[in-house]
Structure formats: C-alpha cells, structure tokens
Amino acid sequence: MPPLLHAEQLTSIRAERCLFAGLSFAVSGGELLQVVGQNGSGKSTLLGILAGLASPDEGQVYYQQQALTTHREAFYQDLLFLGHKAAVKASLSALENVALQRQLDCGDSQPAPTEQDWDNLAQLDLLGLEELPAAQLSAGQQRRIALCRLWSSPAKVWILDEPFTALDQAGIELLHQRIDQHLAAGGCVVLTSHQPLLWQPQNYRTLTLQAQGVA
Amino acid sequence: MKLSSLSLIMWVIRRDLRVANRQRSEWLNPLIFLLMVITLFPLGVGPGEQILSRIAPGIIWVAALLSGLLGLDRLLREDYEDGSLEQLVLQPVSLSMTGLGKIVAHWLLSGLPLVILAPLFGLLLSVPVSAWWVLTLSLLLGTPMISALGAIGAALTLQARRSGTLVSLILLPLLIPLLIFATSAIEAAAMGLPANGQLAIIAAMSVLALTLSPLAMAAAIRMSIR
C-alpha cells in the first residue's frame, strides 16, 4: 500500500543551526509515528513543515504521492493539525468553542450546538463547565476542549504537537483509545511527545531527531 | 469536506462578532475616544458656528482615522496568539478569503458605528444639515479602506510586540488621500456644490483596497506564522 504521507530529503535550518538534513520517512494508513528528540531539536518545526505551515529549506512533503506545494487543498481537506497553541478562544464558552471547531473541521455551517457537540463534551468530561468562558478553565480543561476535535473531525491525517501536555491520567487514557480507533479506521497519526507512549499501538514507529551542528 | 470559501468568510465574521460581544470594551474604546475628541473640540475652539463648521470635516475624519488605527492591533493579534490563525491557514480555502472575512468583521465593529453616528458628529460640530448626507456617505465609503489597509499593517507587524505605533507609521501615509478627498467632499457639500466626484474617488479607492489587500494580508500572514 502506498504511504499516505511521505517526506523526502527534508532539510531545515533555523537561525544558522541545522535542525535536520536529508530526512526521509513515510507514514501509511493505520500507522503512528512518534517524533522524539530533545528540546529545540526541531520536532515542532518538522510538524509545521509536514502541515505546510512552514517550508523546508530543501526537500518536499507528499500527500498521497502528490507534492504539498501543488496539492495543498486536497491535503487540507484531510488534515487535522493540533499545534501546541490550542486555538481555543478564551472569551468563548467550551460549548461555543466546540461548536465552532466542528463547523470548521466538518464543513458544517450549522452554527448552533448539536447533539454531537454535547456528546463530545461528555466524552471529555467537560459537562457542567460548558457555559464558562474557556479563560476560567484550567490548562488541562482547555486542552480537552481542543481535543474534542479528534472526536468530531473526519480527517484522515492527524498531526499532533504534544497532545498529552497538561492532561491528567484519565485524559491520556481517553486519548490513547481515540488514537487506537483512528488507526484501526485506517487513519495515520504523527505526534510529538516527551514521554514514551504508555501503550503499544500495532504499527508504531519513532523518529529521533538529533541536534546537529552549525550549518 | 470542509467549509467552502463563502461559508468560511461567514464563519470568521460570525466568530469575530461573537468574541467582540464578550469583550465589548475592546471595540468600544476607540469609539468612545472618537466621541470624546469630537465633543471636546467645540469646547476648545469655542462654539462659534463659523469656525466649527469650517474645521468640522477635518476633525471628523482625522478622529475617524486615528480611532480606526487604535483598534487595529486587535484585528489579528488574538488569533495569532491563541493559535486560531494557524488553523485558518490550514483550511483548504485560499487564505485571502479568510482575510476578507477578518476585514469585514473589523469594519462591522469599527466602521459601521461611525456611519451610524455620523449625524451626531454633524450636529456636535455644526455641519450644515445639507451636508450630513455627504458626511454619512463619505464615512460609509471610506471606512472600509481603513479596515482593508489596516489589515495589511496588522498582518505585517504580527511578530512585533507593541506594534501600535509601527502600524500607524506604515498606514497613515497611505490613508492621506482618503482624508483629502473625504474632507473636500464634505466641504463641497456644505457650500452647496456637488460632491459626487470626490465620493466616486473614495469609493474607487475602497474597492481597490478591498480587492487587493486580502492578497497582501495572506502573504504577510504566511510570513509571520512560522
């Protein structure tokens, strides 16, 4: 089976430091790729490049064998990117945030909260907090609001930057189950995390970024 | 399928208005500043009708420009800091569409109130009643240009902290033509002359700004985001 997402010879240089050079890898449906490395080794930069937020200094990213630079739109139809900034509006309530995210992710122009939004809130243990402005919730709860997207979005490719940050044990467990479901349904996941995963998905690989010298 | 261009524009506008509704002071402050400037002038230069109506067009438009610039930093800053802007860049729709949505939302919060308040400004500064209509029209046609050019400035200065002064320095020279034509339109109307020419030029400048600035804004956002 051809890979969903693959990268060829990626090189990235930031502030005269070579983060990585000649990096090639592929992720197929059902696979989980964990990017590991020290602080500042370029994990977030790599994820940004995969998502097309930044361009590599050399090399190319392909989605379904087509270069990202020319087939951006097809890729973005299938992409869910969760950066370490959660994209949660601090002045809006959890319910409003979840409804807005769903509209954006599912192309659903129905602005009112739906049954599904409530289910997702319940799933992530946010019931009872849905009317409070997100600014009044804890970091972990805000993270959970952002994670609701994983339950509502139909995207095939998930790119998650530090998804476990600020989550409690139960939250991490929930996320594990959801990632497993997604993999079983043929999706792929690329994530960064400092902790080793607490469970073993079937198709699991790690990619280690080594800090390199001055370019 | 994710949202199409038009529904994405509507999504952005609806979301921005909703956020603004929660943070009223953010967009009310520039308006209150504007009202204060306009009420203070008659006290400062004296209530003589002749002087006031002579300088009124200039005061109204200078105050409108300054209040427009005051709120600009808010246009993209919050989206940039909480990560929403990243998500908007990752939509399968051209980023300039999203930019257009941001511009329209900003205009609804900063430009439209001025249009509605125009007769009040006219009353406070003794603009002849015959010129109120042109005053309102000049604000209606001209303020979209402030939002459109302002959006470019806001996008260019995303990475600069405390970018307020910088944005003003970039934008004020670009807005001077608007100031000249808008005041001349109101002066002409106050003297009973037709102001169609000036208004048509203002409209043309606004249309040009609205068409081209989303493109420039999209390019500037892409540069700032990483």
Image: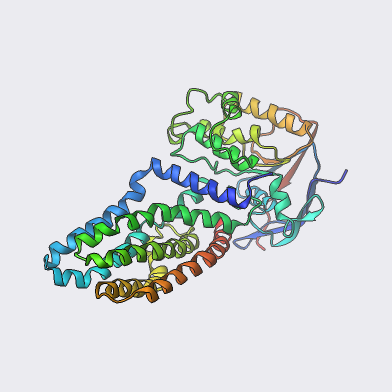
- Coordinates of residue A114 in the picture (x, y in percent): 57, 30
Q: Position of residue A99 (x, y in %)?
A: 55, 35
Q: Is residue A99 above or below residue B50?
A: above
Q: Which residue is at 36% across, 74% downward?
A: B181
Q: Nearer the viewer, residue A142 or B88?
A: B88
Side of B220 relative to A214 (left or right): left
Q: Can residue A209 be spotted in the picture?
A: yes
Quadrant housing the C terminus of chain A: bottom right
Q: Residue furthest right?
A: A1
Tell me: A26 left or right of B185.
right
Hey, which quadrant is residue B115 in on the image?
bottom left
The one of B175 and B130 positioned closer to us in this rendering = B130
From the viewer's perspective, tell me whether residue B109 is left or right of residue A169.
left
Q: Residue at x 54, y 48 (%)?
A: B10
Against B40, residue A150 (above or below) is above
Q: How is the image coloured?
A: rainbow
Number of numbered discs on residues: 0
Residue at screen point 52% across, 40% down: A88
Q: Quadrant of residue B44?
A: bottom left
Question: Residue B80: x and y, percent?
Answer: 50, 51
In which quadrant is the N terminus of chain A drawn? top right
Placement of B8 over or under A166, stated as above or below? below
